[in-house]
Amino acid sequence: MESAENSARSLNFIETIIEEDLRNHKNGGKVHFRFPPEPNGYLHIGHAKSICLNFGLAEKYHGPCNLRFDDTNPTKEDTEYVDSIKEDIRWLGFRWEGEPKYASDYFDQLYAWAVMLIKKGLAYVDEQTQEEISRQKGVPTRPGIESPYRNRPAEESLALFEQMKNGEVPDGAMVLRAKIDMSSPNMHLRDPIMYRVLHAEHHRTGKKWCIYPMYDFAHGQSDYIEGITHSLCTLEFEIHRPLYDWFLDQIAEEGRPRPRQIEFARLNLSYTVMSKRKLLELVEKKIVSGWDDPRMPTLSGMRRRGFTPEAIRDFSDRVGIAKRNNVIDVGLLEFSVREHLNKITPRVFGVLDPVKVIITNYPEDQTEMLTLINNPEDESAGTREVPFTRELYIERNDFMEDPPRKFFRLGPGREVRLKGAYIIKCEDYKKDENGNITEIYCTYDPETKSGSGVQRKVKGTLHWVSVRHAVDAEVRLYDRLFSDEDPAGHKDRDFKEFLNPDSLKILEHCKLEPSLKTVQPGDKFQFQRIGYFCVDKESTPEQLIFNRTVALRDSWKKR
């Protein structure tokens, strides 16, 4: 049994903080978490780490976890993104507390707090341009220049703020700024903007508002309204924490839970871009087919490709929670996917680049039903019947005219075992006018049927499909979208220069065993000797489409 000392050592630094708060009965001994996405794009694997963290802590410490959309920028937000985010969280296996919440639910309260800050002399309306404000903020090593409007009377700022709210001020003409410290080395404390004028229709509030709060003002106050105790965010928000706390200092009331912001390292994945802006660019420029393109790092793309929620949660656990940013090898994610799919997927035969094998001594009209195990990792998966006939398909690269000594597949005079069937020997082959192999002629040894007890062994084992029973399918071989480990890390080059030209190959004449004739979108399989595959959402009974999820092993280690 694990000692208390070892148990404490295994806690990550966030859990250590939470347990200390619970011991001190902070916030009444309660915990309350939230996952607060901005609905301006689809969630990606980096968000999955935050989802698993927040909802996982809620489960561990028996507290609620809210889903809140920080919808403060109507020009970039859409209900499509809201719906996709909800679907992704459910798919990962988490449930949020009550109904989804929105920062826009709190616009009236946020406005009231802004008015209160103006009355206290802690906020003012500034009529300068954004360029002038940025120039006056200066640099961290020198104090900034105060706005000429910084000390205007509160009554004047209140009147102008009312005009801003009522739509009487054009976009960009005025902003509301907090009055903090223009000499602070933390640039976020140099009188940050709280509200801007934006005549844009909001996806939930419609045309009610002509002003919208900035993220830094809305976020912490929304946490406070909801009673959040631990506000977890990534490290880029560490420098925002003093501003987060300053706003709370002005509004917090005795006896109410006050959120504490805690930062952790974001997930950076090799061969991937995680910027929503860059992902949106890939979609808008049709470099990918959409947000759910199986090459995208979005959860919808990974779901379509055949990744499982269990694999993503396992990956998040393996990565862990750290205080320093680092880059995680995408191979670790692919390992988690392989490990789970290996446990749950049925084994089937699929020939992606077929060439015909004719077994000359096998009866022409005979069909033999062979019993094969569906998954050696799972006895409950049972068995299936696969037809064996005189004419079969094998992979083209499983045959060589002049094979090297260690080529343990098929060649003139060589023997191999057909998986679950017989040993065959190549006697001859036929080529077309271009030199391509069209048919391979073999004989079989009827005494070597799998399971017969005959001990004769050969080194090579091939998968196959009966020609007469084969099901046609299109197979899409997806690979990493970028050929560079850090495509966004080259400051002098466009990340799109590193797109992998082989990230998608479409094979249109693949042959599959007949058990796959009735598959449904989302079904997952291991094509033996090839990799893991998932039925695409566009697949129909008339046109089967499979996506390669991952290969059986990491081929990138050889590159």
Image (cartoon, grey):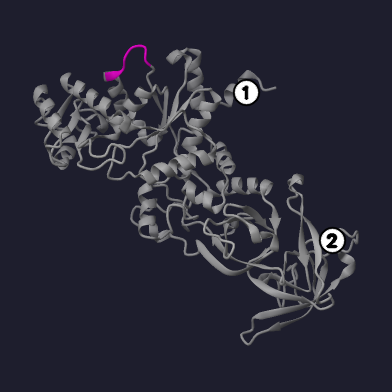
Q: Residues in magenta?
A: 251-256
> Which quadrant would the C terminus be assigned to in this image?
bottom right
The earlier-in-sequence mark between 2 and 1 is 1
Asked if marks 2 and 1 touch (Cβ < 8 Å), the reply is: no
Answer left or right for 80 relative to 309: left
Q: Secondary structure at mark 1?
A: helix
Q: Is residue 146 at least partly visible in the picture?
A: no
Residue 526 belongs to magenta span: no
Who's the residue at 38% across and 22% down the image? Answer: 259
Q: Secondary structure at mark 2?
A: loop
Query: Pointer 1: what residue?
Result: 6
User: From the viewer's perspective, is residue 166 above or below residue 247?
Assistant: below
The spot of residue 537 in percent (x, y) is 53, 55
**Residue type at numbered disc 1:** Asn
The spot of residue 16 in percent (x, y) is 51, 22
Characterize the local packing of mark 1: few (<14), some (14-19) or many (20 or more) Cα atoms within 10 angstroms: few
Query: Pointer 2: what residue?
Result: 450
Q: Which mark is residue 447?
A: none
The spot of residue 494 in percent (x, y) is 35, 57
Q: Nearer the viewer, residue 116 or 409?
A: 116
Q: Nearer the viewer, residue 94 or 12?
A: 94
**Residue type at numbered disc 2:** Ser
The spot of residue 529 in percent (x, y) is 69, 60
Of circles 2 and 1, which is in front?
Answer: 2
User: From the viewer's perspective, is residue 541 above or below residue 269?
Assistant: below
